[in-house]
Image (tube, rainbow, N blue to C red):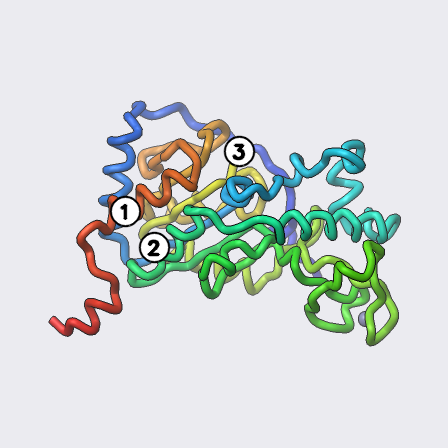
Amino acid sequence: MVRPDLILEQRRVASPPTSEPQTRAEALAIAARALRSAEHVCVLTGAGISAESGVPTFRDAQTGMWANFSAQQLATPQAFADHPHRVWHWYAARREAVRAAQPNPAHAALVLLAARVSHCTLVTQNVDDLHQRAGSRDVVALHGSLMRARCSAGCIGSTEPDDTVTTRAPNCTACGALLRPDVVWFGEALPPQQFETARSAAVACDLFLSVGTSNVVAPAASLPWLAASHGATVIVVNSTMEGQRQGPSVLPLEGPAGVMLPRLVEAAFAGKRTRQREQQGGQ
Ligand SMILES: [Zn+2]
């Protein structure tokens, strides 16, 4: 049975009144202090961090031959049931865009961050592999992987699609059913284990870092506020704060992730040795 709380959907969240505006430098200094003293950091990334690497967001990719297709026609189980080859072709085109892209300074800053804090959980809503290619390990991928495929009849695990052969959905070598992208479509449930890992990290962390996400796609959008309700400080790094929830425990850092994250990590850990060096130093 599918758990309704894990269903992928767009949701608008209400924004409480705006708090006192701060200058960016002040906000950065406050956020850096919070990050420096954090024991467990939970990071949630979204489309914005990939867009800065040139990976088009879902909407931005809907150009050219895809301009007249809605998300409902490309990213739902029904779309695949009705037009499997069209859907496969759309994802093959998106894989091509991801392969042409490189991780950016924001991805690199998150690798550095993981080396500087005692415990870091990296959760992503992105289906590309830029975090992994930057060097992040144990990435919790809530929405699956664009770079993998699986049997639509569910008989085999994840496999790597061969895009050099065809833009048509290939057949499963075990049962003959069509392969589908190993991503979570609208109306489908998130992988329960991955979401539970993310939820536990949001509850346990003392600092939650939201990067490049508008926080409107449920259920991932609930994570920062779950963290805040358990006493964590929430730092929101995004190109716009429009639609983001605000409150006393939320520190907004408006700007590109590729600029703001390296600054934040540098400001937080300048002069602080990495965990490995501290352990080797034995003091
Ligand atoms: Zn199969």
Q: Is any part of residue 145 visible from this angle?
A: yes
First in residue order: circle 3 vs circle 2: 3
Instruction: Using the image as rendered, state which of residue 245 and residue 252 is in the foreground.
Output: 252
The one nearer the camera, 105 or 241, is: 105
Q: Secondary structure at mark 3?
A: loop
Residue furthest toward the left?
283
What amino acid type should be assigned to the residue bearing mark 3?
A: Val
Left or right position of 28 against 106 = left
Is 267 placed left or right of 207 in the picture? left
Residue 180, x across and y down, in percent: 77, 59
Q: CA distance from mark 3 to mark 1?
A: 32 Å
Select label 3 or label 1 by which is in front. 1
For the residues bearing labels 2 and 1, Cβ distance under 8 angstroms: no
Q: Earlier in the sequence, mark 3 or mark 1?
A: 3
Kind of residue at badge 2 = Leu
Asked if residue 65 is positioned above or below residue 158 in the image, the reply reads above
- Whole-percent x and y of residue 117? 29, 59
From the Cβ of disc 2, is ligand 1 less than 8 Å away? no
Q: Which residue is mark 2?
A: 113
Between 88 and 22, the residue placed more toward the observer is 88
What is the spatial separation of the Cα atoms under label 3 and label 2, in whole angstroms? 29 Å
Residue 211 falls in image quadrant: top left
Q: Which one is earlier in the sequence, the residue at label 2 or at label 1?
A: 2
Q: Which residue is mark 3?
A: 13
For label 3, the crowd category at 10 Å Cα-Cα, with few meaning under 14, some 14 to 19 and many 20 or more, is: some
Picture residue at 21% right of the left edge, 60% below the top: 273
The span from disc 2 to disc 1 (Cα, nearest Å) is 9 Å
Seen in the picture, residue 179 relative to 209 is either above or below; the reply is: below
Residue sitting at 80 percent across and 41 percent down?
Answer: 73
Which residue is under mark 1?
Answer: 266
Labels 3 and 2 touching (C-beta < 8 A): no
Foreground mark, 2 or 1? 1
